[in-house]
Image (tube, helix red, strand yellow):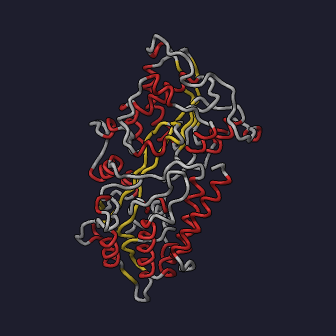
Amino acid sequence: MRFVPLAAAGLAVLSLAAFTTGCTAGKEGGPALGSQPKASNTAPSAIPAATIELWHGFSADSEVKAFTDAIAGFNKLYPQITVKMVKGVQDEQITQAVRGGHAPDVASSFTTDSVAAWCKQGVFQDLNPIIKQDGVDLSGLPPVVDTYTQFDGKRCVMPLLTDAYGLYYNKALMKGNQPPRTLSELTKLAKELTVRNADGTIKVAGFIPSGQYYENGASHLGAMVGAKWTNPDGTSAIGSDPAWKTLLNWQKELVDWYGYANLDKFRKSLGDEFSGKHPFYEGKVAMGIDGEWRVAMLANEAPKLDYGTAPVPVDDARPDLYGSGFTAGTVIGVPKGAKNPEAAWALVKYLATDTGALVTLSNAIRNVPTTKAALESPDLKKDENFQTFLDIFANPRTTTVPAHVNSVFNQEALQTFMTSWEKGSAKDLDAGLKDVDKRIDDKLKLSGG
């Protein structure tokens, strides 16, 4: 996922220490969405005047301005509703506020990792009743969105922009080669483009296969082979899905070609991922996996760099996957206990479905909009490099990490093993992946299944 700011200055006025940490959400606030008879007058003016509070994770001035600009359209439709925004909010702060009876009216998260827990525990309200009551058409959302906005039959959030991951390549370093479409092509090209110093250390890496490198997390790499995370019952499928073995064997072969110690030394010498010293900017890495936001960062931080984007290379045995990738994004919903749920839902529905609002946010923040209409809007700013990510998100084979009550734990369990595997400290791939299954399934049992 893209960088999540840690600052939460906007919550300084709240005393989080006063919030309780019970297992159920607070019960204060207005009635549940969809629990009341539908009003005969459905015009925007029928919603009573209210002041609602929107918590979101964005903190940069440009991002906050984008929200302000998007909400300007909402204010025209609902002049009687005032929206106050609180920036820099993280998931745990939302959870604790709801449990303590201090829920905001609307809350947004950068990640999808908390969705399952929020749905299961009732931290966010189930939107299905109000979606049905209002006749909201969800057919304009790509199918993958269903995977990360609902859990166990409850859709407790709506999508609000997303990230898509693809391959960036330095055209000068590529030496006329086309971007690789398969893992074997990626391996071959990575070796051809790698330049070593006289002592054998790496000067330029064709591609860094390490799972410890920037955006090379298990979730992003798994999409290259169509790997499954879970079985239908929520248990881990990592040890039984041969796609993970395909991925890790490919990764290890290329790591070993570089030499783990050599590659690790090179990786640790590189600049910060979110700085002007990114190795891709400096010509130290020819190809790398990254999100769509890098297009805007390159325009600001390395405007002279001649580069291209393409879908990620895929398993040679799965050419049908080419063009797809990994996605996960920002979500928004109405917490349990919202004092003005009707006005809150009006804002959520507007931000999640209005083409103008989504295009305004996408053009400013440079994330992918989440409806088909917004993806195809002539007002959406896009060039050849950004279009790659719009196409990846819209591809029907694009995947995400499915909603799970232990989403973060599951990803960390696999990531920990991947690091041991690439280092060479883990010798048995089958046993290692089975152990990941056991850790995930044991945690699931502790979490109530």
Splitting the image into 4 quarters, where does residue 92 fall? top right
Task: Determine if residue 309 is in view.
Answer: no
Q: Is residue 356 left or right of residue 118?
A: left
Q: In the displayed structure, would residue 359 be above or below residue 254?
A: above
Q: How far across and down, in percent of the image, does residue 384 sit?
A: 26, 51
Number of numbered callouts drawn = 0
Q: In the displayed structure, would residue 279 be above or below residue 155?
A: below
Task: Determine if residue 253 is in view.
Answer: yes
Q: How far across and down, in percent of the image, does residue 104 sit?
A: 62, 31
Could you say which is closer to the camera, residue 98 or residue 398?
398
Q: Is residue 102 left or right of residue 430?
A: right
Q: How far across and down, in percent of the image, does residue 112 sit?
A: 52, 46
Q: How far across and down, in percent of the image, does residue 246 sit?
A: 41, 70
Residue lying at 65% horizontally and 28% vertically, measured from the top left: 337
Splitting the image into 4 quarters, where does residue 196 fall? bottom left
Residue lying at the far left in this picture: please name it: 176
Residue lying at 52% horizontally and 45% vertically, measured from the top left: 110
Q: In the displayed structure, would residue 422 be above or below residue 128?
A: below
Could you say which is closer to the camera, residue 307 or residue 444?
444
Residue lying at 32% horizontally and 58% vertically, measured from the top left: 321
Q: Is residue 355 left or right of residue 156?
A: left
Q: Is residue 175 left or right of residue 109?
A: left
Residue lying at the far front in this picture: please name it: 233
Could you say which is closer to the camera, residue 140 or residue 62?
140
Residue lying at the far bottom in this picture: please name it: 199
Residue lying at 22% horizontally and 70% vertically, measured from the top left: 176
